[in-house]
Image (cartoon, coloured by chain):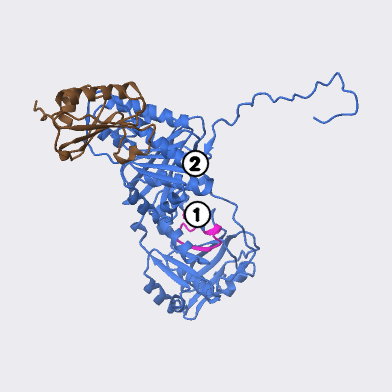
Chain colours: A brown, B blue
Amino acid sequence: MSSTDPGATEVAVTAGAVDEAETWHLRLYVAGESPKSLAAFANLKRLCAEHMEHSYEIEIVDLLQNPRLARGDEILAIPTLVRRLPSPMRKIIGDLSDTDRVLVGLQLRPRQVS
Amino acid sequence: MTSVSTPPSVLLPPPPTVPGPPRPRPSGLRKSPTGISGLDEVTGGGLPLGRPTLVCGPAGCGKTLLAMEFLVRGITEFGEPGVFVAFEETVDELVENVASMGFDLQQLQDDGLLVMDHIHLAPGDLEETGSWDLSGLFVRLGAAIDEVGAKRVVLDTIETLFGAFDSVATLRSELRRLFMWLKERGVTAVVTGERGDGSLTRYGIEEYVSDCVIVLDHRVSEQTSTRRLRVLKYRGSLHGTNEYPFLIGSRGVSVLPITSIGLQHAVSDERISTGIDSLDSMLGGEGLYRGSSVLISGTAGTGKSTMAAQFCAAACGRGERAVYFAFEESAAQIVRNMASVGIDLARWVDEGLLEFRCVRPSLLGLEAHLASMMDLVSDFRPDVVVMDPVSDLMHSGVGDEVYEMLTRQVDYLKSAGVTAVFTSLNAVGDPESSEQLIGSLIDTWVMVKLEEGHGGRHRVIYILKSRGMAHSHETREFVVSESGLRVADVYRPGVRS
């Protein structure tokens, strides 16, 4: 986690973003600065930089600081990435190391039929 | 230490001022009482304190209810707040489901004594990418525990998680960590699990919950269903190893261990009339003790029901309330038949003093009979209860099961101060043996039988036993006429009375 305040919201906006409605809202749930949480955040940033064509914002929620927030999005596993916008909501768990599956999970890439 | 005027003796070392380390408790495991009737007897005091217990069984066996009652009684009877994590039912459903047992979950939540959390899991909802853990669940559970200072936690049914996650290996190691964590938090947890094929639970979570395992079951035998409970395992503790019938009544779960039969009910010195003067005189001249149990047994057609009805009518005549459980006849039929021998039951039904409950014994399992009996007794608050004939109930179960049920029944009525009259039909030629089962439970045993002679059959009556009174040992003739029942003179074969 780059920030020393894990409850902070980080926003990254790709160049040329215009339409507010098209902004993707991603929320990453972590529990402190565990290796898995750090890896997930790093992977997410890289992934967005490389594959995201929309404007987006990433919000980090640290459940250790805000345990009650786990109830809202039904969070059990850590890390969990929630695509809050566009709807429908999508949930991806794990450290996001499997780029292909993350892209499929976010519906940035169609599911491959094997 | 108090100062002593005499010089200190060199022989006596000064008493230690610093206490040594506390000795380990010889009693071993500490327990968390469940407050569930009978279960604490079976487990020797409750569930292992600060450890998880697995409650498993097939669908609909009462796992959730048992777990919920453990939590509710923990709050209401032992001052231990609780957390209920529901993986299947929603909070609203649970609140509704247990309201019928008098548990007001909403109130407990409002009072800050209970946290209920429904965890919604949709299979296939989650995309798994790389390693994860269940910290979210831990955090959520930890927050709920801290919110009310919970000492008891229920996870119902945690195996649902297996439907939501692909990586079973991760899930298993996380569940193991979860149970370790629960122990570290020192909460007494109940984890429920559904029975699997050839294993206690579908995903074998009994492997992780090794301190105490309780198995619930409901089986159908002879077309009636009986719920059963068994403590399969209780590490470090003695426990009842039998299968115990249990029931779910309007006041929660009730396990029927034979050992819980309390012989501590208050006894009454008050005597009440049987409604038949001459029978009263055979019973030490004053009739029965209030709150005692009476068995009237005899072969078919000897007037057992009539005697029981007379007893009800006498009670109602004193302004008391009576419940008549009939297992063979309808209420209307009993009222008509009794009217023909001068016993007016209709009047007492109209006045609301007499209530009939007519049901075929085979309609319900033994436990359900007991539950419905208990409910009616606690609602109607009768002074007298008749079970006619109790021998019919004996056929709806086998052996010990029936004995336990009857014992429980007699015990319940006694503790409620209700005078109980049981009639029992026995086979001709074997008048006394068939009731050995119940005979030891009851206080007064009246036998009625038919004797042949004088060109006809005569009813004779005698008191086989009657605890706590100098009862008659005579055999008398017993007459049922249009004007009621009468016990005549001492019966002498060959002499007309």
Q: Is residue B106 left or right of residue B453?
A: left
Instruction: Quickly name the residue at label 2.
Output: B42
Q: Residue A100's quadrant in the figure?
A: top left
Q: CA–CA distance between discs 1 and 2?
A: 23 Å
Chain letter of disc 2? B
Q: Is residue B170 left or right of residue B326?
A: left
**Comparing marks 1 and 2, which lies closer to the viewer?**
2
Task: Tell me residue B390's x, y (percent).
Answer: 44, 59
Q: Chain of mark 1?
A: B
The residue beneath circle 1 is: B438
Q: Is residue B273 above or below residue B48?
A: below
> Residue B304 at x, y = what percent?
47, 67
The residue drawn where x is 39% and y is 77% is B336
Closer to us: B219 or B3: B3
Residue at 55%, 57% (x, y): give it: B415
**Label 2 near label 1: C-beta < 8 Å?**
no
Residue B188 percent coordinates (x, y): 47, 36
User: Which label's residue is closer to the chain start, 1 or 2?
Assistant: 2
